């Protein structure tokens, strides 16, 4: 599957999608999150991290730009790095911060506001687009690599209609 679209009813739908995505993820995945302020990018990331087993507080890295989380997947310790590039003035800031070193086969990188550094970011495996729609959100997932297609093929999610 290369594309997936759904309407997520209220916050519960976002949490359920995050849990489903977490079950489908593998190390090395890069996910771009697109959407306006308040569209649910951080809420979706928080749901993914909690479903992956992270028990602590998940905050938006708006001021720190990146928050690392140590996660155990199938007995393998991996890092999930949550980036929020909203406050970056230029793509060079991303390079100057040394963030490119996080992109490897052992790390899952989730990037909010990727357009702020798109010229220097590695290409994504999955684009996630979120938009507010009534009381919920519309979401589109689009795979853009073989690893992204594999992830979406593993995705088991049926939104409540």
Image: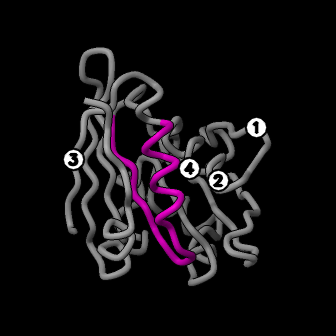
Select label 3 or label 2 by which is in front: 3
How far apart, in angstroms, are the residues tagged by discs 3 and 2? 28 Å
Name the N-terminal-most of marks 2 and 4. 4
Q: Is residue 42 above or below residue 9?
A: below
Name the N-terminal-most of marks 3 and 4. 3
The residue to which callout 4 is attached is 48
Horizontal and vertical percent position of residue 70? 76, 63
**Within 10 angstroms of label 3, few (less than 14), some, or many (20 or more) residues?**
some
In the image, what residue occupies the spot 43% across and 69% down?
121
| Disc on res. 66 | 2
In the image, what residue occupies the spot 31% across and 58% down?
127
Mark 1–mark 4 CB contact (< 8 Å): no
How far apart, in angstroms, are the residues tagged by discs 3 and 4? 18 Å
Mark 2–mark 4 CB contact (< 8 Å): no
Magenta-tinted stretch: 15-35
The residue to which callout 1 is attached is 57
């Amino acid at each position: 599957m290369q594309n997936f679209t759904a309407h997520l009813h209220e916050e519960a739908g976002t949490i359920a999608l995050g849990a489903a995505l977490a079950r489908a993820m593998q190390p090395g995945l890069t996910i771009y999150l697109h959407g306006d302020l308040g569209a649910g990018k951080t809420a979706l990331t928080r749901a993914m991290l909690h479903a992956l087993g992270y028990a602590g507080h998940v905050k938006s890295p708006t001021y720190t730009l990146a928050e690392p989380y140590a996660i155990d997947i199938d007995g393998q310790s991996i890092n999930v790095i949550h980036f929020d590039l909203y406050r970056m003035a230029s793509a060079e800031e991303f390079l100057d911060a040394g963030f490119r070193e996080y992109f490897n086969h052992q790390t899952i990188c989730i990037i909010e506001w990727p357009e702020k550094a798109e010229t220097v970011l590695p290409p994504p495996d999955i684009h996630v687009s979120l938009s507010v729609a009534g009381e919920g959100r519309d979401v589109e997932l689009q795979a853009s690599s073989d690893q992204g297609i594999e992830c979406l093929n593993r995705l088991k999610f049926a939104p409540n209609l």
